Amino acid sequence: MKSKRVTHTAKFFVMLWNIGLFAYIWCMYYNQNAFQTYYVLGGIISIIVYVFIYNGLCNLYNAFRIASSSIAEMVLSQTISFGIADLILYVECNLIRNRYTSFIPGAIIAAMQIIGTTVIIIFSKRYFMNCVTPQKTLLLIGSWVSREEASRFEERLLKKYSHLFDFRYVEYESIASKAFEEKLAECCTVIMYGLSVEQRRVYMQKCIDEHKNFYFTPRIEDIILQGCSTRHLLDTPLMKYDYVYEDHKRLNAKRIFDVCFGILFTVGFAPVMLLIAMAIKIEDGGPVFFKQKRCTKDGEVFEILKFRSMIVNAEAMGVQPTISFDPRITRVGRVIRRYRLDELPQVFNILSGEMSFVGPRPERVEHVDIYCKELPEFKYRMKVKAGLTGYAQIFGKYNSSAFDKLRLDLLYIENQSLGLDLRLIMLTVKVMFQGESTEGFEKEMVRLMNRRARRVG
């Protein structure tokens, strides 16, 4: 309860600081320029609009998750949230006034918002870390999972959430029932990683009986069930799979959105793309663009277009996955890869109908062959058109395993909608500034990616 009070108090002060600063500069400067009549009413409505936009973006970017987000991530989320809200209201002022209004007062306030938000978040995070006690946790792993993979899973969790989980026990699903009950009694949380269906059901029931927190990794079937709807044909409940990715109305709406947004995207990013093209050409005189065969819907092969970020003939020795600090990456390439700017030319693939803005990333033909042999379910992700951004790009990493990427992509496929597409596009803005999402394959991951990823549970 104390930790919740900390997060709620921090949220209150951050919102008070950012909204208060905006309200001050709006009333003292911008409002009098925007509204010659209805001065008071115009100011009140503008502040209310700002609050709705700012709060909505904070919820979208999880800008108040002190427990599960780093300080840098929260500051970034807050900056994007109030930055977009500030910009929208500044544009509103110029449109209502029908002439240019100085952005300098707003820029000063934005700088103060960043400084104040950073201070509040740092203080709140440190105080929260002193208040929270890691929960005693039992990690249950499936019989097919190696000890090495289980250790890596545990390590990844503790790297970000050591303040939330204290792994007291790590056991395989074959643990004796009595031993499990004894360990469960000592722990508050159970994490089930790759358990078989039968064992997962048993352990979930015991956790519910004892009112313990529990997490589990979903099977492919669990995700596919999200694309089903309930049918009451009899007194026996029935679930019907709806093939949401074949809905022609949704597909037409998605295509219209891709074309309209693609045109705006091309116009808006034209100066940036021109500068990148010039920088690539100046650095080594090689070609600006890089083409590569990829797979999209139904396994159709097309040539994806990207800004060249590596030396010419980088794969002269054969296909080589990118590793961290890859010597083949150019100086310009390191910058554009970090912020995913090398992907910008793919807007032309979108306009031509080969890709969509949102969908599973198109994999290389060679990788698709490997994944389909090791993961037969991999073919399901090619039921929809490949995308510039997607679930796996936002919630995963570049070096996430093939199976984890598959599960993330299937979550999108079974829940897709125009609203979800817009949300994922907005989230991509944040991901572009987070370095870990574009990490290269570590050498160990290069070795592991070719191992059988088939999940039993």
Image: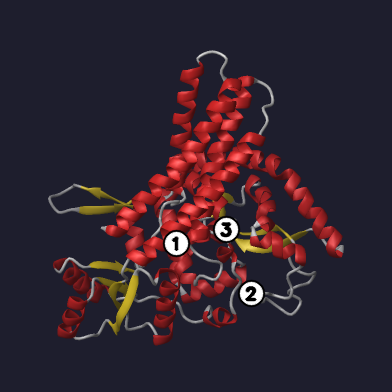
Front residue of 210 and 301: 210
For numbered disc 1, what is the local secondary structure?
helix
Which residue is disc 3 drawn over? 296
The residue pinned by badge 1 equals 408
Image quadrant containing the C terminus: bottom left
Where is residue 259? Give x, y as percent: 61, 40
Q: Amino acid at mark 3?
A: Thr
User: Residue 86 appears in which quarter of the rendering?
Assistant: top right
| Quadrant where the image shows the N terminus | bottom left
Work out whether residue 223 or residue 103 is closer to the camera in this orientation and state it.
103
Q: Nearer the viewer, mark 3 or mark 2?
A: 2
Q: Where 221 sits versus 106, above or below?
A: below
Q: Residues within 10 Å of mark 2 (few under 14, many from 20)?
A: few
Judge the density around disc 1: few (<14), some (14-19), many (≥20) Cα neighbours within 10 Å. Answer: many
Looking at the image, which residue is at 46% across and 65% down?
406
Q: Give yes or no for contact between labels 1 and 2 (Cβ–Cβ under 8 Å).
A: no
